[in-house]
Image (spheres, rainbow, N blue to C red):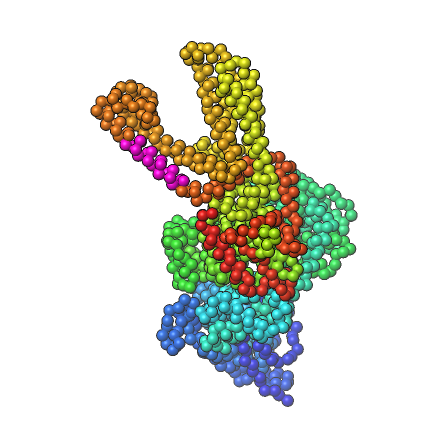
Amino acid sequence: ASASPTSITVPATTSSSVSKKTRAKSPMHRTLRTGSGEGSGGGSKHGSATADEDKAISDSLHSGLSAADFASSGDAGPPPSVLAGRSGIGSYSNSRGASKASGRSRLSHDGNQVVPGDRQYATNIRHRRVRKGGTFSSYEASCYEPMIRKSWELLKIRANVIGKTLGVILYNHLFDKNTDLHHMFDKTEEEMGEKFLLVFEDIVAAVEDPVAINKKLKSLAPMHLRKGVKPEHTERMKVALYTTLQQVLGDDYTAEVKAAWEWLWSWLSQEMQQSLEDATNEATVLTYSWDLALDNNTEEEMGELLYDTLFELAPNLKPVYRKPRQILSAKFVEMMAALVSFQGDPMRMEEQITWLGFRHIKYGAKREHAKVLGDVLVETMARAVESNWTMDMADAWQELWTDACSMMMSVIDQATKYGFTVQDMWDMVQERTTEAKFGSTLRKLLLSGTEWVSSLSYGILESCTPAKAEAIQSTSDFKAPLSKMALKANGEKEAAEVNTKNPKFPQDDGVVEKSSESDAIGRYFWVMLTELLNLLWDPEKQNERLIVMTTKLFEWGIRSKHLDTIGEAIGEACRRTLKADWSKHMESGWTWWWSVASKQMAKTLFVCEHDHCRIIKESWNKCKERRSSFQLGESFFVELARMAPHIMHLFKRPKVIQAEQFVAVVDALVSFVENPEVFFEGFKALTIRHIKYGVKAEYAKAFGKSIMIGIEKTLEDDFDLETREVWAMLWMRASSCVSRALNVGTNPVIVSLVQGEVDKMRHAINCAERGLRFEWLTGVDINGELISPIYWSLKDGNTPMVRFILSDLLKIRADREMYYYGREVLFDRHPDIVLKLCQECPDVLIDTLLQGLMWHSKEVEDGQLRVNYYIQDLYCDPDKEPDVWKQTLAVLVTEGHPRMFAHPVARKLLEVKWKRFGRNYFLIVQSVYVLILTLFMIGHVEHRHECSYQPIRYVTGSFSVLFTCAQAAVCFRHFKNGWIANNEILFNAPVPSWIADTSNVMRLLSLFLISISSFVDCCDCTEDWLEGTHNGKYVVCMGMNSVAGIILWGVLMQSLVLSTRLASLTYTLGLFGREILRNLVVVLVFVCSFGTALTALKQEHCSTFLLAIIHLARFVLGVDHQAISFVDPLGLLFLFGFIIVVVVGMFNILIAQMLGSVAQVAEATVGFAMQHQASICIHMESIMPMSWRKEIYGEMKFDESVTFDSGDAGPSGAIQEMEPASIRNSAYYFPDRVLRFTGDTSPKDPWPTTNLEDSSAQETARIAGKTSSPAL
C-alpha cells in the first residue's frame, strides 16, 4: 500500500508544534546544535574518509534513485518535479498584513494622517498580519534526504583533496562576483568557512526536522540583521553554493544531486527571509506596543496595572509575592522594559536573563509560575494598549516571554541545584585550610600542568616588575603583600607530587610542605573565589568584579585557553582539601560554576587578547583631533534626537556644557577597556548623577547607537569593520553595567527623590515593612554606595522633602509588642546631621529635628508634666566622637544661630552638660584667675612702689607661669588630637581650638605679661620715677601691668555667665565692642590720611607725621580745644574736612550700627546668653580627661528604657524631667505624640495608613510654623 505525500506548514513561532514523519534515523543523522561546538566539518578535521569510501559514496550518487526504489519502500514515488530535476517545493506566501515601522510618529485614529508623537511609530502593523511559513513536504524530504547526506559527505572529502575547506571555497566564489559584500564579514575566510560548515552540518543532520532547522535559522536572524543581510542576498549565496557544489563534486554533480540541493536551498532561502522579517517585525511590534502602553499610562500606572492583573488572574500567587506593592510594580516594569530594550540582541538578552534568573532564586521563583506570568504579561499589555491591541502584539509578547522564561528557568534550575552546593563547598574549604596552604597546593597543581602554567607560576612571578607587583597588591581585598612575595620568588621550583584521582595531576605523597613566597598566584585565586562566591546571587556585581580581576590576570599572562586548566586545578585543590567529604555533586557544582564564571572571564580576555584597548584609544583620539568637543557632542545629540526624541527632555543645560559631558562619558568608556577598576570607581558618581537626571536603563540602547553613529561620521573611512565591532563590544559590556546600575532608579523611594514629590515619598514608604521603614528613609543603595535621601534632598534644595523624612523618622509608633522610633537609625547613618542642617537650612529644619526628640505627657501630676528628652545622640558618646568640637553642642555654637537655644531640647542639652561638669570646671578656672587678680591688685597695683611686697609679686608670677604652662599643655593636647580651629583675631589662622576663643587668648596674654613683670625688680627704679626721672625698665613694667590689669578684669566679667540676665548683658557689650573696633579701624585710616595732609602743610604742632596723628587724636577726643588756633586757612580747610568725615560721619554711623545691634540682641538676648554659656561648656569639656567624660556619660544611663506613663516603658536614649504644667502654653507642646496601632504586630507588615499620620504631620507643621519666628 502506498501513502500519499504529506505536507506541513512551518509556523513562524518556535513554540508551535509540528508533526513530522517518523522513521529510523540513519547513522549520519545528528541532533541539531543551537550554538557553535564540536562536530564534523571541513578541512583536516573531517578528512578521515578513505579513497574507498569516496568511491563508494560516488557510486551510490551515480546510481541515483529510481521510481522502483520508492515503490519498494512503500511510497508512491517521487513527484514529477523530482524526476525533472526541480525542487518541487510548494508556493510560499510572504505577504504580511502590515508594513514595517518607520519614524517616531504615529497614525491618527482615522488611520490616514501621520501625527508627530514622542514615543510612537508611523505604522499600520496594528492590524492582523497573516503569518504563513514555507510549505514543507515530509515526503519530498524523505526522497532527497539520502542524496543530500551522501553528497555532503563526499563534498567534505573532496574539499580535503583540494586542500581547502568547503566553506573557504564557497566564500571564494561569493567574493569573486560580489566584492561589495566584503564589509559584512569581519573575519577571515577560514574562520567564516568553518562557521558555514558547522551551520550546514547541523542543517544536513536535521534535514527532515523543519522545526529544528527553523529554530536554527531564527537564532541566526538577529546576527544577520546586525550585519545588514537582506533577502536579495540569498540569491547571490545560492549562485556561490551551486558553483561550489559543481566544482567540488565534478562528475558526481548529477541532475538528481542538483535537484536535491535546489529543493533544500529553495526551502532554506524562504525560511531565512521569513526569519529576517520576523526578527524585524517582532522587535517593531514589541517596541511599538510598549510605546503605546507608556503613552496611555505612566510607569507607575503600568506597574500597578500589572500587579492588579497578576492577583486578579492568579490570586493563589499572593503568598509568593510578599514584597510591597510599589516595589513589585516597579520591578515588573523594569523587567518588561529590559525585555523590550534587548530584543534583537540575543547576547545581551541572554546575559540579562541569566542575571535575572540568579536574582529570582532568592525570590523563590518556580517553573510553574512562568506560564501564569506570561498570560498576566499579555493581558496587562492588552489592557494598557487598549483599542490598538492586536493578535500580532499578543503573539510577539507571548513568544518573547516564552523564550525568556525558558532561558531563565534553565538558569534557575542549574543555579538552584548547584549554587548553594558550591558556596557550602567553599565554606568547608576555608574551614579546613588556610589561604597560604591552599595557594601552595594550587600552585603545585598548576605547575604539574602544561608548559604555560609553569611559565605563569614562575616566569610571571620571578620576573615580576614593580608595576606588576603594585598591580597585584592593589587587587581588591588582597590581604597578603603579594608584591613582595612575587619579587622574592627567585628560582624556587618544586615538584608537585600529590595524591590525586585525577590522572591529569601527579599523585600526592601526603607531605604538607611549608608555603613558599612564590604561592602568590595560588593565593590570588583564593581571594578571588571568596569574593566572587559571596556575590553569587548578585550576578551584576559579580560580573563587575570579574571584569576587574580578569584584566589583572591578563596582565600576568593568563589567556582564554588557560581557563579550563585553571578550573580543573582549583577543583582538584578543593577535592584534596576536603578529602572524604568531597562528593560527586560538589564536583558537578564546581564544574557548573566555573563554566559560568569562565564564560564571563573569556569575554574580557578576548577583548584584551585582540588589543581592543589600542583600537579604541586610537580611534577616539582621531575623533578628538578631527573635531572639537562641541562638534562631537552636537553630532551625538542630533542622532539621539532623531532616534529617541522622547528622552531629549533630560538635556536642559547649554550645548557647550553637554558636549563636554558627552566627551567625558566617552573618555570614561575608553577607561573601561583600559583600566576597568578606575572606570568603576568613577562609575558610582556618574550613575548617581544620571539617576538624579531621570535617566533609565532602557535609554542605554539609544545612547549606544548615537555614540556609534557619531564616531562613524567623524572617522568616515577609518571606521572600518574591525573598529565598528570593537566599539560595539565595548558598549555592550559597559552598558550592561550601566543598565544594571540605572535599574535601581525604579526603586519607589528613588523615583520620589528624583521627582521631588513628598506625596510620592509618603506613598512609597507606606508600603515598607515596619521593621525596614527607617532603613528606606535613611539610605538607598546605588551601585554599592549608600546614599542618604536626606542629604540628596538637601542638595537639591527640597526642604519639604527633608522635613517630611525627618518627621517620619522621629515619629514614635507602637503596636502591641514594641515601639518603633527612628532616632538611632537617623543618627547612626547621619552623625553629622545637625551640622548639615545648620549649614543648609537652619531656620526651618533644626526645629523639625529637635521637635522629634521630645515627648510630652498629656496627664498633669501635681501641677507638673512628664517630659522625655531624647538627647543621647545630641550629647554624643565620647567613645564614638571624642572630638568635643564636632559634638552637637559645639555645632550649635559655631554653625547655629542663638535662637536655636530657644528650643527646649537644645536648652535641656546645655542644662545637662552645664550642671554636670561645665559649671564646676568653669568655677575652678575662674577661681584661679580671681586668685591671680587678687595677688596682682595687691602686689602690682596698690603697693607697686613698695619693695616689701616683692615676694607677693613673685608668688603672683609663679602662679602665672604655672597656669601659662597648663594652658600650653592644653593647646598641645588639642593640637595632638587634631582639634584645630580658626582664630578671628589672628586673621583666621589655624590654631589649637583652646586659643581659638578670644577670652582664652586674653587669659594667656595677661598671664604672660604678669609672669614677666612679676620677676622684674623695680624697687631701684621707684625713687627715680618719683624724682621725675624716666627709667625705661620701669615704664615697660608698668605698661605691662596696666594691660594685664585691664585684661584680668575683662576676663573676670565672663563669670557673669552664671546668670542668664547678666550673661546677656556681657554678650551685648561684646557685640558693641566688636562694632566699635571695626569703626575705629576706619577712623584710624582717616586720621592717618588727614595727618599726612597737615604734616605736608607744615602746620604748627604737626611738624612730624606722629605729632600730627597725636594732635588729631586729641582733637577727636576733645582734649585739645585750641587746635583750630594753630592752623592757617588751608590747614583749617583740611581740619574741617576731618571733622565732617570722622567726628560727624563715622561716629554717627557707629551710633546707627549700635542701635541696630541693640534691636538684634533684643530679639534673642537669652539665646545669645545660652550660646555663650554653651561655648564655655565646650571649652571646659575639652580640658577634661577622657576617663571622666566617659564616666559622666555612663551616669546618664541612656541605655535604659524611659517610661511614657506609669508602667509603659518606651524607647531608650532619653532623660525624663517633670516640668511645670504651664509649658502647655508653649508652641512646642504636643501631648502624647505616640501613634499607637492595633492589629497584627509582625515587623514584616507595613504600618496601617490612618488619620493619625495626617494629624501628626499637621501638628508638626503647626509647630514649625510657630517656631520659625526668631521671637522667644
Q: Locate the N terminus and report the quarter of the image it occupies.
A: bottom right
- Identify which residue is drawn at 31% across, 25% down: 1115
Q: Is residue 734 in view from this perspective?
A: no
- Identify which residue is drawn at 62% across, 88% down: 2
Q: Which quadrant of the figure has residue 102?
A: bottom left
1160 or 1199: nearer the viewer: 1160
Judged from this view, the residue extending furthest toward the front is: 862
1072 or 182: nearer the viewer: 1072
- Identify which residue is drawn at 49% across, 81% down: 91
Q: Looking at the magenta stretch, what is its main secondary structure? A: helix
Q: Does the magenta stretch include residue 1147?
A: yes
Judged from this view, the residue extending furthest toward the bottom is: 1
* Image location (x, y in percent) of residue 531: 63, 52
Image position of 570 with respect to 299: above or below: above
**Relative to residue 637, is residue 368 drawn left or right?**
right
In the image, the segment drawn in magenta is: 1140-1158
79 or 444: nearer the viewer: 444
- Identify which residue is drawn at 28% across, 29% down: 1138
* Image location (x, y in percent) of residue 83: 54, 82
* Image location (x, y in percent) of residue 78: 57, 83
* Image location (x, y in percent) of residue 336: 53, 67
Q: Is residue 1268 in view from this perspective?
A: yes
Q: Which quadrant of the figure has residue 313?
A: bottom right
**Relative to residue 622, is residue 170 drawn left or right?**
right
1054 or 343: nearer the viewer: 1054
Q: Is residue 850 magenta?
A: no
